[in-house]
Amino acid sequence: MAEPSEATPASLEARLPRREALRLHLTLAFGLVLCTGAFWFELSRALGGNALSWAYVFEWPLLSVFAVYMWWQLLHPGRDNRVNRKVKSLDPSFGGMLERWEESRDDLERSRDSEGDTPGV
């Protein structure tokens, strides 16, 4: 009989437990209902002549898009973002360049520290 860790793919192991995922889904649903209601409220005020409400007409949908993005990120915690994937796919020949740059930076910091130690200059 196979062990559970061998039978389940790595992507399933990184998922949230059911209870936490359900809480996350309910929070998103509540947030989207709130954003939709606020959008309609501000739209009716903006169409009624309140010029400031036009800013909120565009703010609430943007806030709901951000909520969906954060919901997705929290629901899938083990996924790498695009920046990490790009860094991992760099050419190995750049490793030496990075090491030399870090050494040069450390030398510069040491020289700045030694200049700060000399009194009366």
Image (cartoon, rainbow, N blue to C red):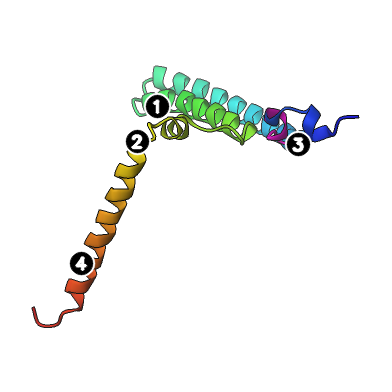
- Please provide percent x and percent y for residue 108: 22, 60
Secondary structure at numbered mark 4: helix
- Contact between marks 1 and 2 (CB within 8 A): the answer is no
Q: Which mark is residue 17?
A: 3
What residue sits right under mark 2 in the picture? 93
Mark 3 residue crowding within 10 angstroms, few (<14) / some (14–19) / many (20+): few
Secondary structure at numbered mark 1: helix
Which residue is at 40% across, 27% downward? Answer: 53
The residues bearing labels 3 and 4 have C-alpha atoms spaced at a distance of: 51 Å
- Please provide percent x and percent y for residue 36: 55, 22
Q: Earlier in the sequence, mark 1 or mark 4?
A: 1
Front label number (4 vs 2):
2
- Amino acid type at mark 4: Arg
Mark 4 residue crowding within 10 angstroms, few (<14) / some (14–19) / many (20+): few
Front label number (1 vs 4):
4
Total count of labels: 4
Report whether 51 appears left or right of 111: right
- Amino acid type at mark 2: Ser
The residues bearing labels 1 and 4 have C-alpha atoms spaced at a distance of: 53 Å
The residues bearing labels 3 and 2 have C-alpha atoms spaced at a distance of: 41 Å
Q: Which residues are magenta?
A: 11-17
What residue sits right under mark 1 in the picture? 53
Q: Which mark is residue 112?
A: 4
Q: Quadrant of the C terminus?
A: bottom left
Q: Does the magenta-highlighted stretch encompass residue 43?
A: no
Q: Earlier in the sequence, mark 1 or mark 2?
A: 1
